């Protein structure tokens, strides 16, 4: 999906894949492997955004998050916020924890839903519109 996004929008992208924290059934996929999450830094001419995309091999219904720091935040603070979000996700059994989302007051956080009939191109188009707005 991220490769499609890079082809759709003129941005610089850095990505890493992390394992979702252990602790609940949600942390493990149906094949027994640990669920992963892509964390993507998207840099365009005017801003830096972060995409948090949780792996959905089981079509789990979870929105992608777009994080937009409101001020210059250190990478350490951004990393800490993402860790809190993922910990809250696991504790809520695979749903974004609204109280944790609210605690990230130094960022605008937008949820982008996945739709079952979405193609990769549909998702990339919707993400590019959100990233450029």
Image: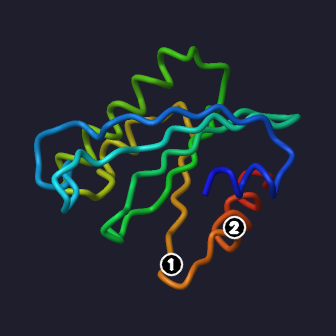
Q: Give residue 75's position: percent from left, percent from top.
A: 55, 17
Q: Residue at x 33, y 54 (%)?
A: 96
Disc 2 to disc 1, how far (Cα)?
A: 11 Å
Q: 115 or 95, which lies in front?
A: 115
User: Is the image coloured rainbow, by chain, by secondary structure, or in one colour?
Assistant: rainbow
Label 2–label 1 contact, CB within 8 A: no
Q: Is residue 74 left or right of residue 122?
A: left
The quadrant the C terminus occupies is: bottom right
**Mark 2 crowd level (few <14, some 14–19, many ≥20, 10 Å Cα):** some
Secondary element at tag 1: loop
**Mark 1 crowd level (few <14, some 14–19, many ≥20, 10 Å Cα):** few
Q: 47 or 10, which lies in front?
A: 10
| Residue ID for mark 2 | 126
Q: Which mark is residue 115?
A: 1
Q: Is residue 17 left or right of residue 7?
A: left
Indicate whether 89 appears above or below 48: below
Q: Give residue 19's position: percent from left, percent from top.
A: 32, 37
Image quadrant assignment for residue 127: bottom right
Say which label, 2 or 1, has the lower sequence index: 1
Q: Give residue 71's position: percent from left, percent from top.
A: 66, 25
Q: Residue at x 35, y 40 (%)?
A: 85
Q: Residue at x 69, y 67 (%)?
A: 126
The quadrant the N terminus occupies is: bottom right
Secondary element at tag 2: helix
Q: How many marks?
A: 2
- Taking the view exactly as shown, the residue that stands out farthest to the front is 31
Q: Residue at x 29, y 48 (%)?
A: 35
Q: Give residue 58's position: percent from left, percent from top.
A: 30, 68
Q: Which mark is residue 101?
A: none
Q: Is residue 100 left or right of residue 44?
A: left
């Amino acid at each position: 999906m991220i490769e499609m996004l890079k082809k759709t929008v003129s941005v610089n992208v850095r990505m890493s894949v992390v394992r979702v924290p252990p602790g609940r059934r949600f942390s493990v996929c149906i094949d027994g492997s640990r669920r992963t999450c892509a964390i993507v830094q998207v840099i365009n001419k005017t801003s830096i955004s972060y995409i948090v995309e949780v792996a959905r091999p089981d079509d789990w219904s979870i929105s992608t998050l777009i994080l937009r720091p409101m001020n210059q935040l250190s990478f350490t603070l951004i990393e800490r916020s993402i860790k809190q979000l993922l910990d809250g996700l696991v504790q809520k059994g695979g749903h974004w924890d609204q109280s944790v989302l609210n605690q990230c007051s130094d960022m605008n956080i937008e949820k982008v839903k996945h739709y079952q009939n979405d193609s990769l191109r549909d998702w990339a188009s919707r993400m590019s519109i959100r990233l450029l707005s």
